[in-house]
Image: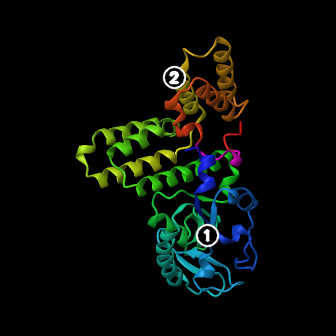
C-alpha cells in the first residue's frame, strides 16, 4: 500500500515530550515548542504527549534537577536542595511504559539534555562535581528497555536531514511490522514481507539483509515465534544504519537492471545522469527515484511496484529532498 494512502486511513501514534508540543510543563514553567513536530509531523502522526515530571506528581514550576552518581544507575536529585526524586520517577516509569503499550506507539521523540527524557549524552554529575556527558534520562531509559526496537530520537537531532529521514523511515517500517504481526502471519507471509522490503533493507545494510535471508531460509532451526522475534531484531537493527549515497546508488542501479532492455537510449542517459548528479551531491535522492518510479509505471514492473523502497513514507514530509 502506498504510504500516502495509508496515513490517511490509519493513525500512527508517536510519543513526544510534552514541552516540545508547546505545553508549559518545564521546571521554569515554560516550554520548548518545536514547530517541525507540531506543524509538519502532526499532519501525519497522532502525537501522544508525555511529561514524566508532571505526570509523576511534580509541580510546575519546580526546582531544577540533575542526574548524579553512577552513569549506569544515576540518581535524580534536585539541584539546590538535594532532594532525591529517583524512586518517585522510577515508580512512575514502571507504570507509564505499561500504559504506553495500549497506545501502540511507532516511535518517540524526546527532549534532549533532560535528566528524565534525554536520550543521549545527558550530564551525570559525580562526586567531583564535574559532569560526564554519557548518561540517559530515567524515563528515556525505561522506554528504551521496555520497547527495545521502538524508533527513538531526540528533537534537536531531527535538524540533521539524514537523521530525520532515517528516523521517520524507521517509524513507518516499525508500524508496518506491528501491523504485520497483528495478522498472525505464516511463513509465506514473512517471505512476502521480506521480499517487499528487500531494496529498502539493502540500502541500509546489505550485510544484515543477507543475514535476514539466512534466518528465513534456516527457519526449521527456530520455532515460529523465535523466527519472528529474530527477524524483527535484524529488521530494525538494519534500518538504524543510515543509508549512504553509495548504498543508495547500488540499489538504484539494481532497480535499473530490471528494465534495462526496455529503456530507450535517451531514458538510459537521463537516468544515469540523474544518478551521477545524486552521487556528486548535486541533486537529492528524490530526483533519480522519481525517474525510476516513472519508468516502473511506464514499463509495468509489478515486482518493483511492490517495493517499499520507492515509497517509504508520505510525500508531504518532504524527505529524500536534500542533496
Q: Nearer the viewer, residue 94 or 77?
A: 94
Q: Secondary structure at mark 2?
A: helix
Q: Which residue corresponds to the image point at 71% horizontal and 39% vertical from the top-left?
A: 322
**Image: 229 above or below 13:** above
**Which residue position is annotated with label 2?**
258
Residue nearest the observer in this picture, 233 or 263: 263
134 part of magenta stretch: no
Is 221 located above or below residue 97 in the figure? above
* Image: magenta residue range: 312-318
Q: CA distance from mark 1 to mark 2?
A: 59 Å
Q: What is the quadrant of residue 56 in the picture?
A: bottom right
Residue topped by disc 1: 130
Q: Is residue 206 visible?
A: yes
Numbered disc in front, either 1 or 2:
2
Is residue 120 at least partly visible in the picture? Answer: no
Residue 231 sits above or below residue 28 on the image: above
Q: Quadrant of the C terminus?
A: top right
Amino acid at each position: 500500500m502506498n504510504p500516502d494512502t495509508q496515513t490517511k486511513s490509519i493513525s500512527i501514534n508517536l510519543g513526544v515530550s510534552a514541552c516540545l508540543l508547546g505545553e508549559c510543563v518545564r521546571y521554569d514553567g515554560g516550554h520548548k515548542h518545536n514547530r517541525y513536530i507540531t506543524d509538519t509531523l502532526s499532519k501525519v502522526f497522532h502525537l501522544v504527549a508525555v511529561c514524566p515530571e508532571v505526570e509523576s506528581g511534580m509541580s510546575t514550576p519546580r526546582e531544577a534537577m540533575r542526574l548524579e552518581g553512577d552513569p549506569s544507575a544515576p540518581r535524580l536529585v534536585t539541584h539546590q536542595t538535594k532532594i532525591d526524586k529517583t524512586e518517585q520517577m522510577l515508580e512512575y516509569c514502571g507504570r507509564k511504559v505499561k500504559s504506553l503499550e495500549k497506545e501502540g506507539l511507532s516511535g518517540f521523540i524526546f527532549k534532549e539534555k533532560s535528566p528524565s527524557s534525554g536520550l543521549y549524552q545527558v550530564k551525570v554529575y559525580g562526586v567531583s562535581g564535574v559532569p560526564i556527558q554519557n548518561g540517559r534520562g530515567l524515563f528515556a531509559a525505561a522506554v528504551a528497555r521496555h520497547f527495545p526496537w521502538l524508533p527513538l530520537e531526540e528533537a534537536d537531532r531531527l535538524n540533521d536531514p539524514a537523521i530525520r529521514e532515517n528516523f521517520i523511515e524507521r517509524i513507518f517500517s516499525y508500524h508496518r511490522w506491528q501491523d504485520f504481526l497483528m495478522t498472525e502471519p505464516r511463513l509465506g507471509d514473512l517471505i512476502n514481507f521480506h521480499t517487499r522490503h528487500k531494496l529498502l533493507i539493502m540500502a541500509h545494510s546489505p550485510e544484515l539483509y543477507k543475514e535476514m535471508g539466512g534466518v528465513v531460509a534456516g527457519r526449521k532451526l527456530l520455532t515460529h515465534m523465535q523466527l519472528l522475534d529474530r527477524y524483527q531484531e535484524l529488521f530494525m537493527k538494519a534500518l538504524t544504519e543510515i543509508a549512504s549515497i553509495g548504498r543508495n546508488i547500488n540499489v538504484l542501479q539494481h532497480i535499473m537492471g530490471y528494465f534495462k532492455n526496455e529503456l530507450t537510449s535517451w531514458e538510459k542517459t537521463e537516468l544515469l545522469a540523474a544518478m551521477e548528479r545524486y552521487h556528486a551531491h548535486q541533486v537529492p535522492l528524490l530526483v533519480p527515484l522519481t525517474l525510476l518510479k516513472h519508468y516502473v509505471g511506464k514499463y509495468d514492473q509489478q515486482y518493483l511496484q511492490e517495493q517499499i523502497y520507492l515509497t517509504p513514507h508520505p510525500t508531504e514530509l518532504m524527505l529524500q529532498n536534500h542533496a
